[in-house]
Image: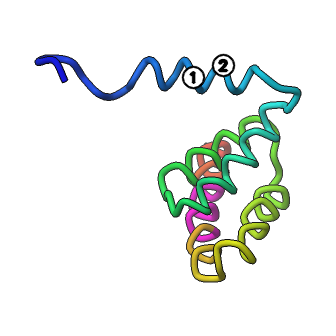
Amino acid sequence: MAPGRSIWPDPSHESIAKAVDAAGPLDRKSCELIKIGLSVGAGLETATRSHVRRAMEHGATEAEIEQAILLAMNTCGFPRTVMAWQWARQQIDRQQKDASA
């Protein structure tokens, strides 16, 4: 990497993400619910929290978020699903607290 060049945020990463999001028929809420499942499968706490927040911003309900996480159980296992639910619950609680403030 060239001196003085930051690796974060990577503008090419952002450009690819925006292009992929716009490429198909899925709405933003559906994309975020799918990304929750992907984040759970990869065991990524920060990404899970981020996509829970974004899903809620695009109208996802707690029940929809819960289902997105529970769908991972047979593939990813119970421990990872429980861990992801804890992350999501904390983010949901934070969103609700911020909304009521």
Q: Residues within 10 Å of mark 2 (few under 14, many from 20)?
A: few
What's the mark number on residue 72?
Answer: none
| Quadrant housing residue 92 | bottom right
Which SS type dominates the magenta stretch? helix
Q: Residue at x 71, y 72 (%)?
A: 75
Q: Report the residue marked by disc 2.
A: 19
Quadrant location, the C terminus: top right
Amino acid carrying mark 1 in the image: Ile
Q: What residue type is labelled 2?
A: Ala
**3 part of magenta stretch:** no
Residue 58's x, y, as percent? 77, 35
- Does the magenta segment cover residue 88? yes
Residue drawn at point x = 48 percent, y = 52 percent? 46
On residue 16, the disc is 1
Going by the image, does 60 lie left or right of 72? Answer: right
Q: From the image, which quarter does the N terminus lie in?
A: top left
Taking the spot 62% from the left edge, 61% from the top edge, the residue there is: 88
